[in-house]
Image: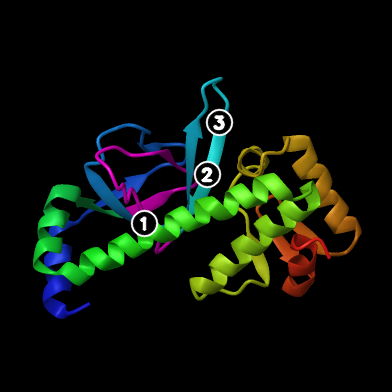
């Protein structure tokens, strides 16, 4: 990004802070803002017709939020832990896209990545055993940490067991039982509720693939 583009983006943004369990925006609301998470973690979910909640993803520092391809947000976003974010008015951002077309291309690329992640989750829900799902989930968190330039030796798990269950299509009991099983098999060490140490990511990869 060139200096001029960076300066104009900075002029658009405001800094926003959200306490844990605070809703950043609701599904079907007007998509008036695009957000860039600068710290903390966010869960994305949709409410199903019968009132159940399906978590569709988790976002962390560096991720963009609310890249709606239409006029409304397609999911609800809620802070898991204290979150700070840069907030951009969508209309002003779109005017900037007219001026710098490759910025729009980058944003569209991120929206496509979001769709790809949703497709990966559909595969995760449909084809894997509970053990494969939990291993895939831990591996995803570890890879996201590496992508952010952090060590993956200890996997940070800020979300609750209930959140993990709603993401993987499992019960809370199954998530807890599977984590205990992985610990007994010496695949992971449960340091505390929010931190898990993997003996080796290659072992998680094998489990995730059902090997």
Q: Is residue 160 visible?
A: yes
**Quarter of the rendering occupied by the N terminus:** bottom left
Instruction: Determine crowd level at label 2: few under 14, some 14-19, many 20+ residues with C-alpha closer than 10 A.
Output: some
Circle 3 residue: 53
Measured in 3D between alpha carbons, the distance from the residue under mark 2 to the one under mark 1, in whole angstroms, is 14 Å
Q: Percent position (x, y) of residue 8?
A: 11, 66
The stretch drawn in magenta includes residue 179:
no
Q: Earlier in the sequence, mark 3 or mark 1?
A: 3
Looking at the figure, which quarter contains the C terminus? Answer: bottom right
Circle 1 packing at 10 Å, graded few (<14), some (14-19), many (20+), is some
The correct choice, above or below, for 188 with respect to 127 in the image is: below
- Bounds of the magenta segment: 61-85
> Residue drawn at (61%, 62%), measured in percent from left and top?
140
Q: Nearer the viewer, residue 177 or 203?
A: 203
| Residue at 79% across, 40% down | 174
Mark 3 → mark 1, Cα distance in angstroms: 22 Å
Residue at mark 2: 56
Is residue 81 shown in magenta?
yes
**Nearer to us in this view, 205 or 33:** 205
State the residue position of label 1.
111
Tell me the tag on residue 60.
Answer: none
Q: Nearer the viewer, mark 3 or mark 1?
A: 1
Q: Residue at x 90, y 60 (%)?
A: 185
Q: Position of residue 164 (x, y in %)?
A: 64, 44
Report if the CB atoms under discs 2 and 3 are less than 8 Å apart. Answer: no
Q: CA distance from mark 2 to mark 3?
A: 9 Å
């Amino acid at each position: 990004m060139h200096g001029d583009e960076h300066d104009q983006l900075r002029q658009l943004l405001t800094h926003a802070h959200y306490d844990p369990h605070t809703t950043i925006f609701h599904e079907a609301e007007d998509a008036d803002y695009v957000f860039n998470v600068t710290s903390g973690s966010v869960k994305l979910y949709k409410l199903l017709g019968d009132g159940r909640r399906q978590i569709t993803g988790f976002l962390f520092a560096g991720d963009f939020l609310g890249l709606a391809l239409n006029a409304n947000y397609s999911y609800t976003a809620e802070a898991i832990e204290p979150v700070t974010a840069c907030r951009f008015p969508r209309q002003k951002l779109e005017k900037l896209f007219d001026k710098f077309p490759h910025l729009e291309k980058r944003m569209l690329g991120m929206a496509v990545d979001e769709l790809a992640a949703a497709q990966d989750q559909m595969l995760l829900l449909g084809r894997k055993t509970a053990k494969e799902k939990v291993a895939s989930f831990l591996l995803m968190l570890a890879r996201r940490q590496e992508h952010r330039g952090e060590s993956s030796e200890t996997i940070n798990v800020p979300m609750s067991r209930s959140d993990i269950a709603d993401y993987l299509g499992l019960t809370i009991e199954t998530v807890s039982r599977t984590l205990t099983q992985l610990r007994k098999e010496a695949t992971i060490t449960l340091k505390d509720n929010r931190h898990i140490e993997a003996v080796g990511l290659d072992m998680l990869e094998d489990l995730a693939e059902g090997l």
